[in-house]
Amino acid sequence: MTANSSTRRAPFLALYATLVFGFIYLPIVVLILYSFNRDGVGGFPPRHLTLNWYAQLFADSAIWDSVLNSLIVAAGSVLLALTLGLLAALALDRADFPGKALFRRLVLLPLILPGIITGLSLLMFAVFAGMPLSLFTVFLGHGTALISVATTELFAGLQKMDRAQEEASLDLGATPWQTFWRITLPNLKLSLIAAGLLIFTLSTDEIAVTFFLIGRDNTLPLEIWGRLRRGITPEINAVSTLIFAVSVGLIVIWYHLRARSLGGRSQELLETPGESS
């Protein structure tokens, strides 16, 4: 009876899944189609396809200045968040100290707080410290707000790591610093790359924190937001399509690295019984 009921529910579940995925991805498909529409954003389906909007996009210096600003901020945020996140993850995994449980919750707090609260609090701190608003304040805001992402990913990597190699390194006379550089850090390579890709994506997509901390130079999300207030244009659709393509590429890279990591661990588990025998 259970098999029969599952068979009867299968078409409804398939229809439900189709509707959900259609609701999520159909607007993206429409956006991509309109980026090639010669007649702009009016009329569906597009009848005359063209690449003129992409040609205008590549000739738009303001857009590419904002892209460069976003890349600079995102790269700096990755370095800052990974550095501080690695230290926090090591403290949570390897050290015992008073208030450790509270520290763990405080590290994860930016994941829970709304972006507007984080941005406003960082703005008040920048004003209190006398820092002029610029890309530097945006970099500090993104880097500190995304430490929780780095800490979560790296702490999970440390939890999965086999400590036997580190213990063997120490037993053979290596210092803790040498063990960290030659054993711990290489074993965290995939976790570092995965966290870096996620932080990079979130930083280039951040609006709320950036809105409060930006100075005279725009990042790409704020440049798009400012143009949308004057109306939707196919050029915006074109740049959104490129952002979507880059995001999908980063997700594919992250998934490939994740699969390699899981595959490597499974292979090690399969080889262990043979080695021990």
Image (cartoon, rainbow, N blue to C red):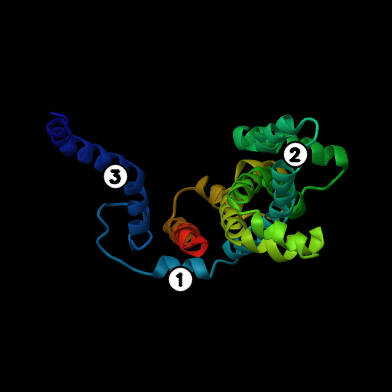
Compared to residue 140, the image places residue 274 above or below, namely below
Instruction: Identify which amino acid the numbered label 3 is placed on.
Output: Gly
At 62% across and 37% down in the image, what residue appears?
115
Question: Does residue 12 appear to the left or right of 131 in the view shown?
Answer: left
**Quick one: label 1, few (<14), some, or many (20+) residues within 10 Å?**
few
**What's the residue at 61%, 37% (across, down)?**
111
Residue 22 marker: 3
**Kind of residue at badge 1:** Ala
Residue denoted by label 2: 122
Q: Residue furthest front?
A: 277
Question: Which of 27/22 is in front?
Answer: 22
Query: Where residue 193 appears, x then y in whole percent?
Result: 59, 60
> What's the CA distance linking mark 1 and mark 3?
30 Å
Circle nearer the N terminus (3, 2): 3
Comparing 148 with 141, the one in front is: 148
Amino acid at circle 2: Leu
Q: Is residue 68 visible?
A: yes
Q: How crowded is the residue under tag 2: few (<14 C-alpha within 10 Å), some, or many (20+)?
A: many
Asked if disc 3 and disc 2 are in contact, CB closer than 8 Å, the reply is no
Percent of width and height locating residue 191: 59, 56
